[in-house]
Image (cartoon, helix red, strand yellow):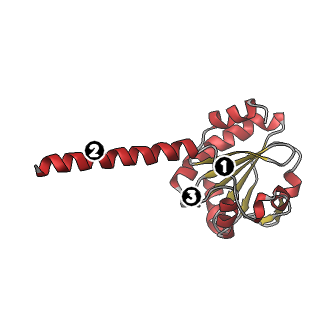
């Protein structure tokens, strides 16, 4: 009788996990609409970030063309794995007007060291720990990394993606014309 009860409990637990996993999988591209001050898209375009090698990046300078913003960190294994894919997307679509920005939830020194090992052709800026609030306000309520947001040329959020992405997936976003 105990083994039968354990089997039923195991099946129930597996079903619950499968349901939760399915819900997470479905929510990865379309996160819920964010709540908070940065749901006002104008507020995002007023932000400024330090660059790892010095200087500043103004979000306003990126407005007017489609933009993919990738939140990442040097200590995040999926972030590191997807970085070459995001760079590939950047190389393949820059001539068509697409921009990419990497916002590191990290400090300058580890980001500089990372970029020396794995250089990318798109700009990278430092969001630091305050970037966690930004990504939550952009719809990533879990505060997990990596997190990617696509803006259209008018500065509106078109897509959100929690988890690792690929150049192929990003290319499908670009092909959709957003």
Q: Quadrant of residue 117?
A: bottom right
Q: Position of residue 20 (x, y in %)?
A: 45, 48
| 6 with respect to 91 (left or right) | left
Please name the residue that numbered disc 3 is placed on: 144
Q: Give me the residue at 67% from left, 37% from top.
A: 170
Q: Earlier in the sequence, mark 2 or mark 3?
A: 2
Residue at numbered disc 1: 148
Q: Are marks 2 and 3 in contact (CB under 8 Å)?
A: no
Residue at left 43%, top 44%?
19
CA gap, disc 3 to disc 1? 11 Å
| Labels 1, 2: front one | 2
Spatial CA span between label 2 and label 3: 29 Å
Quadrant in which the C terminus is drawn? top right
Name the residue carrying label 2: 11
For residue 142, side relative to residue 100 (left or right): left
What element does badge 3 sit on? Answer: loop
């Amino acid at each position: 009788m105990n083994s039968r009860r354990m089997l039923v409990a195991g099946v129930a637990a597996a079903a619950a996990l499968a349901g939760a996993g399915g819900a997470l999988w479905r929510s990865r591209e379309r996160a819920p609409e964010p709540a908070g001050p940065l749901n006002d898209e104008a507020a995002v375009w007023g932000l400024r970030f330090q660059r790892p090698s010095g200087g500043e990046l103004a979000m306003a300078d990126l407005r007017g063309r489609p933009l993919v913003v990738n939140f990442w960190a040097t200590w995040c294994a999926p972030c590191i794995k997807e970085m070459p894919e995001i760079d590939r997307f950047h190389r393949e679509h820059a001539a068509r007007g697409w921009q990419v920005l990497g916002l590191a939830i990290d400090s300058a020194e580890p980001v500089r060291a990372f970029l020396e090992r794995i250089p990318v052709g798109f700009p990278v800026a430092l969001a630091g720990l305050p970037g966690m609030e930004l990504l939550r306000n952009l719809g990533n309520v879990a505060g997990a990394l990596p997190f990617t947001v696509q803006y259209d040329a008018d500065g509106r959020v078109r897509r959100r993606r929690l988890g690792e992405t690929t150049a192929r997936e990003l290319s499908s976003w670009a092909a959709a014309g957003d």
